[in-house]
């Protein structure tokens, strides 16, 4: 079997997987089917090692489910389909970067808000808070329905009253909305802001997200390079 000289354990050692993981990757279509010897043993080649390494990098960049989809497409040979999947993965990362930039800009915009220094006298009714922020009461009710700023009630159908912490959250949401943040984005960001007691914590959380995006982007770049070698191997000779 020309070019096929590696055992399952050899592929695993070179790609950083266990024997069972290599078999699972073959079963899932991440690796092309192994050849079999006359006695039924699997035999692999360099393409299997390259495929395993490409999958490892892609999984770090886009997650295992999407990485498997990309690898299966690569082994079916239709190059445009593989490139389209990679383009979509890059587009999602670019969108995450854009969201992160907006979050960082919003954090700068609200850095003057008192995130920890709240007083009991800061509690407000809906009308009082709406007037203080310069928004309509219906806006506050919308934020309540979306789970962004949920006021307390003395009774199930009693009047809404915002505690000092909730007033702080409303001021933050208001500034973020002015900075162009969408409701869906705020649902993801507000829990982080509530946990943070200082703006240094917010900055650190955003820096951690930025580092994660950078790592995934680099992994996707490495996976695409490894995938390119696999696609080249499938190309017919001129």
Image (cartoon, rainbow, N blue to C red):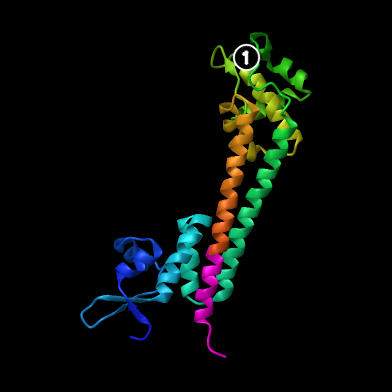
With respect to residue 233, does 57 lie above or below?
A: above
Q: Position of residue 124 (x, y in %)?
A: 68, 13
Magenta segment includes 27: no
Residue sitting nearer the eye, 185 or 144:
185
Q: Position of residue 84 (x, y in %)?
A: 60, 67
**View extreme (right): residue:** 134
Residue sitting nearer the eye, 29 or 117:
117
Range shown magenta: 223-238
Residue 116 location, quadrant: top right
* Left or right: where 154 falls relative to 126: left
With respect to residue 133, does 217 lie above or below?
A: below
Using the rendered image of the protein, determine whether residue 159 is visible from the camera's viewpoint: yes
Residue 112 location, quadrant: top right
Q: Position of residue 97 (x, y in %)?
A: 65, 49
Using the rendered image of the protein, determine whether residue 27 is visible from the camera's viewpoint: no
* Left or right: where 103 falls relative to 2: right
- Rendered residue at 59%/24% (across/down): 197
**View extreme (top): residue:** 121
Magenta segment includes 231: yes
Disc 1 target residue: 159
- Rendered residue at 46%/74% (across/down): 75
* Left or right: where 28 falls relative to 107: left
Q: Position of residue 192 (x, y in %)?
A: 58, 32
Looking at the rendered image, the quarter that the N terminus falls into is bottom left
Predominant secondary structure, magenta span? helix
Which structural element holds mark 1? loop
- Rendered residue at 32%/60% (across/down): 18
Residue 82 location, quadrant: bottom right
- Rendered residue at 57%/91% (across/down): 238
């Amino acid at each position: 079997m020309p070019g096929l000289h590696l055992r399952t354990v050899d592929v695993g050692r070179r790609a950083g997987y266990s024997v069972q993981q290599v078999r699972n990757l073959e079963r899932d279509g991440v690796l092309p089917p192994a050849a079999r010897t006359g006695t039924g043993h699997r035999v692999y080649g360099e393409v299997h090692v390259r495929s395993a390494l490409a999958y490892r990098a892609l999984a770090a960049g886009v997650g295992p489910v999407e990485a498997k989809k990309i690898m299966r497409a690569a082994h079916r040979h239709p190059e445009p389909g593989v490139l389209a999947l990679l383009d979509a993965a890059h587009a999602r990362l670019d969108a995450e970067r854009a969201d992160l930039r907006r979050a960082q800009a919003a954090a700068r915009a609200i850095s003057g808000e008192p995130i920890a220094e709240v007083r009991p006298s800061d509690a407000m009714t809906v009308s009082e808070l709406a007037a203080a922020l310069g928004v309509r009461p219906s806006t506050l009710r919308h934020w309540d329905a979306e789970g962004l700023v949920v006021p307390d009630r003395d009774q199930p159908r009693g009047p809404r009253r915002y505690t000092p912490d909730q007033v702080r959250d409303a001021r933050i949401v208001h500034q973020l909305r002015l900075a162009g943040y969408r409701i869906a984005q705020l649902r993801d960001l507000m829990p982080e802001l509530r946990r943070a007691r200082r703006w240094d914590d917010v900055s650190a959380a955003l820096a951690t997200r930025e580092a994660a995006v950078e790592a995934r982007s680099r992994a996707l770049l490495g996976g695409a390079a490894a995938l390119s070698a696999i696609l080249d191997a499938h190309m017919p000779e001129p």
